[in-house]
Image: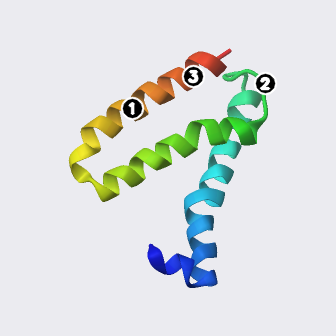
Amino acid sequence: MIEQFRNQELAQLHSRMNYDDILKFFAGMIEFMIREKILKKGNPELMAAQLALPVTAWINLCDREPSREEEAMGLIEKHVKQFFEIYKR
């Protein structure tokens, strides 16, 4: 992890894997759900960030502190439910 700060290639790989690819996937999924009238119209990229980035942070927390997995999973469940309460049609 620290190596990414010294190596530009690793930094780019880390950004792609932990940010770009995740947001691209979630934005595509949200665009689909908007088209299918499952979710309200909105900015898919922002909605993807709102949904995915906190989940990613909690998963990373579990990687560093496995003893907090139950806490993180509870937060993820509440977060996803709240997202759909806000954006569901």
Check disc 2 and report its element: helix, strand or loop: loop
User: Residue 85 bears which disc, if any?
Assistant: none
Q: Find residue 43 and report its image quarter.
A: top right
Q: Residues within 10 Å of mark 1 (few under 14, many from 20)?
A: some
Q: Earlier in the sequence, mark 3 or mark 2?
A: 2
Q: Which residue is mark 2?
A: 41
> Which image quarter is the N terminus in?
bottom left
Q: Residues within 10 Å of mark 3 (few under 14, many from 20)?
A: some
Q: Earlier in the sequence, mark 2 or mark 1?
A: 2
Could you tell me the amino acid type at mark 1? Answer: Leu
User: Residue 75 bears which disc, if any?
Assistant: 1
Question: In screen coordinates, is 89 left or right of 41?
Answer: left
Identify the residue shown where x is 39% and y is 32%. 75
Identify the residue shown where x is 41% and y is 45%. 58
Mark-to-mark CA distance, 2 and 1: 25 Å
Position of residue 42 measured from the top left corner of the image (x, y, whole percent): 78, 28
Position of residue 84 measured from the top left corner of the image (x, y, whole percent): 57, 22
Position of residue 19 measured from the top left corner of the image (x, y, whole percent): 61, 57
Task: Tell which residue pokes out farthest to the left in this image.
Answer: 67
Compared to residue 55, the image places residue 1 above or below, namely: below
Q: Which residue is mark 3?
A: 84
